[in-house]
Image: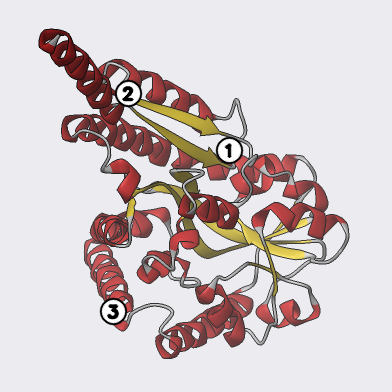
């Protein structure tokens, strides 16, 4: 009898141990099924499942079926989801300096961006982890350009338009204040409807996002000024991630970091291709004059001052970005013929 009880106890404990080791991460994303992002996510899920002997599985919810970034974060909080692929700005309340790349008109080229990112990306990843989310590197989304229904070449013209801003975006709000604009905040999922109903008529986004989310169907002009640099991350709730065995955590980090390195490399060219695609579809690319560009830069400097006052970004992070960028520019100038 005692032997049978011992065997039953051993079986129960074994089953408990196995279930404690097996984890399914539920991840939401706006990326549609069939997109390059979802293809890589599906492949990574298979690799992780195989390398962990099914102890870690990932269930993806693509195409925004779980709602926009704000909705996904709410569902993570109530444990309905464990993570999401989302824009970095959506996680600003967990690490406010994650929006440092949203400072307007800081960069002239992707070469500048790449140099600055080599310094600041690791700090952002660490900041997210301290804020409660495990991420696997940043996938750059390229520059966001102003896109509109009517032509806009200088910031003064924006005052006559209904400009969209993402909901609860402190950095954008502080920046818009410098442009004397009262933006219309909307969740990402409502932007297309907002354009269709003329609730908004002007947005700032990357060419790739404009095409993927079908926003380009409602727009006629792109102002070729790199307003901000955008990126995305795959953020997993740290508490959920810690339920995975340590050895399996390493596998997940390795596989997903590889995926985000690949996605980051791909997007370097995607935006230029998408911009060309927009032009082929009849959208006019506007190139501001030198005087117009000077006006944009003047407003951008005011926006930076507003960001310092509002504490939407820490002064130390703004200083680090400026210092890193200035160092790069000085080296480029010294080596130019």
Q: Quadrant of residue 17?
A: top left
- For the residues bearing labels 2 and 3, Cβ distance under 8 angstroms: no
User: Mark 3 Cα within 10 Å, few/some/many (few <14, many 20+)?
Assistant: few
Quickly name the residue at label 1. 31
User: In the displayed image of the protein, which residue is found farthest to the right?
Assistant: 197
Q: Quadrant of residue 166?
A: bottom right
Q: Secondary structure at mark 1?
A: loop
Please state if 177 lies on the left or on the right of 27 as rendered. right
The residue depicted at 51 percent of the width and 80 percent of the height is: 300
- For the residues bearing labels 3 and 1, Cβ distance under 8 angstroms: no
Q: Secondary structure at mark 2?
A: helix
User: In the displayed image of the protein, which residue is found farthest to the bottom?
Assistant: 309
- Specify the label residue 319 is tagged with: 3
First reached walking from the N terminus: tag 1 or tag 2 = 1
The residue depicted at 16 percent of the width and 30 percent of the height is: 247
Q: Nearer the viewer, mark 2 or mark 3?
A: 2
The residue depicted at 43 percent of the width and 91 percent of the height is: 309
First reached walking from the N terminus: tag 2 or tag 3 = 2
Along the viewing direction, whichever of 331 and 138 lies nearer the viewer: 138
């Amino acid at each position: 009898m005692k032997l049978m009880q011992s065997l039953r106890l051993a079986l129960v404990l074994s089953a408990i141990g196995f279930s404690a080791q097996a984890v399914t991460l539920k991840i939401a994303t706006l990326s549609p099924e069939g997109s390059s992002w979802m293809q890589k996510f599906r492949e990574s899920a298979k690799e992780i499942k195989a390398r962990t002997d099914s102890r870690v599985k990932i269930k993806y919810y693509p195409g925004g079926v779980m709602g926009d970034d704000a909705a996904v974060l709410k569902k993570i909080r109530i444990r309905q989801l464990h993570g999401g692929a989302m824009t970095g700005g959506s996680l600003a309340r967990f690490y406010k300096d994650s929006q440092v790349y949203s400072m307007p008109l800081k960069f002239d080229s992707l070469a500048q961006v790449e140099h600055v990112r080599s310094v600041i990306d690791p700090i952002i990843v660490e900041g997210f982890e301290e804020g409660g989310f495990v991420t696997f590197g940043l996938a750059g989304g390229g520059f966001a350009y102003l896109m509109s229904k009517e032509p806009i070449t200088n910031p003064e013209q924006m005052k006559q338009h209904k400009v969209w801003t993402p909901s609860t975006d402190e950095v954008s709000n502080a920046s818009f204040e410098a442009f004397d604009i009262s933006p219309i905040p909307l969740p990402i999922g409502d932007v297309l409807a907002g354009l269709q109903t003329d609730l908004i008529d002007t947005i700032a986004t990357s060419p790739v996002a404009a095409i993927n989310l079908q926003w380009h169907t409602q727009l006629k002009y792109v102002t070729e000024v790199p307003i901000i640099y955008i990126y995305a991350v795959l953020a997993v709730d740290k508490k959920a991630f810690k339920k995975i065995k340590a050895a399996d955590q390493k596998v997940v980090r390795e596989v997903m970091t590889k995926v985000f390195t690949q996605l980051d490399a791909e997007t370097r060219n995607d935006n230029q291709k998408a911009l060309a695609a927009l032009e082929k579809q009849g959208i006019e690319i506007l190139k501001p004059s030198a005087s117009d560009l000077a006006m944009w830069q003047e407003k951008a400097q005011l926006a930076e001052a507003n960001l310092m006052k509002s504490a939407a970004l820490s002064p130390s992070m703004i200083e680090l970005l400026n210092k890193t960028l200035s160092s790069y520019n000085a080296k480029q100038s010294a080596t130019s013929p």
